Amino acid sequence: MKNRPITVFLNSLGISGTEQQSVARTVLEDEGFTRAGRTNMAVHKERDAENALGARLALHCANKGCRETLDKQERQASEPRTLVLVERDACQVCGGSADRRAVNEMAAAMSGAGLSRAVVVGGTKPKWARMREITPQSVEWRFVDGLGNSNQRDASSDLKWGDVILIWAGTPAQHRVTNLYSGPRTITVPTTGIAALAREAARFARGRGERSSNSPN
């Protein structure tokens, strides 16, 4: 069973400050994902742990407007969540302008190269939902659970469908799944941010477009 430091997991969610990680860790202990004194957590718990944190914490960036928006929202909620300052990309109000900018650039690069379909192996449901929300309609997504039960037939279908296959290596994903998705259109994204994923897809698309334009007629 693979483990990784809880601090690294929280950093991947944009919860990086010492005080903020302490608040998040209290939630993880309350929900039974870890206990006092432990520094690591099993990777397979991370998806459920992220959902539990989302149910208990309202994440905002340093922007005053974002904090005020969430504060007002939580005051009106029947079960208000605790406000926590996070990195801009993890803000639940603005979503991080870097994400939107990178996704828009990815969509433009893919369109320019005649590409429209992307398969992502790894990630979590909250991130998948966010990506669908901020992505222009010109891009279609398929998301594969990196801890799920994908088989060769599933992978073959995805490989045939996708113009680019993105292995989101920094998120919960096991080799038994990711190894099914190797191929000439497969690239590995080593970090966990949506913007990083989009930038890698854009880089791939621009490279494909350049190769097409340089090909002899």
Image: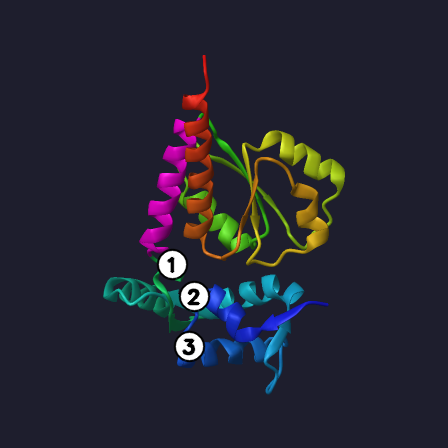
Instruction: Reply yes or no: does residue 96 show up in magenta.
Output: yes
In front here: 80 or 38? 38
- Left or right: 154 in relation to 135: right
Residue pointed to by mark 3: 20
Q: Name the residue: 66% across, 64% down.
A: 44
Residue sitting farthest toward the bottom? 37
Quarter of the figure with residue 138: top left
Residue sitting farthest toward the top? 217
Name the disc covering residue 89, or none. Answer: 1
**For the magenta stretch, what is the residue range?**
94-113
Secondary structure of the residue carrying tag 1 is helix
Q: CA distance from mark 1 to mark 3?
A: 15 Å
Q: Name the residue: 42% across, 46% down.
A: 199
Residue sitting farthest toward the left? 64
Secondary structure of the residue carrying tag 2 is loop
Name the disc covering residue 14, or none. Answer: 2
Q: Name the residue: 40% across, 76% down.
A: 17
The residue type indicated by label 3 comes to Gln
Question: Which of the marked residues, 1 or 3, is nearer the chain's N terminus?
Answer: 3
- Left or right: 131 in relation to 68: right
Asked if the residues shown at circle 1 and circle 2 are in contact, with their CB atoms under 8 angstroms apart, the answer is yes
Q: Indicate whether 197 appears above or below 115.
A: below
Number of other residues with Cα within 10 Å of mark 3, as a class: few under 14, some 14 to 19, many 20 or more: some
The residue type indicated by label 1 comes to Asp
Instruction: Reply yes or no: does residue 60 show up in magenta.
Output: no
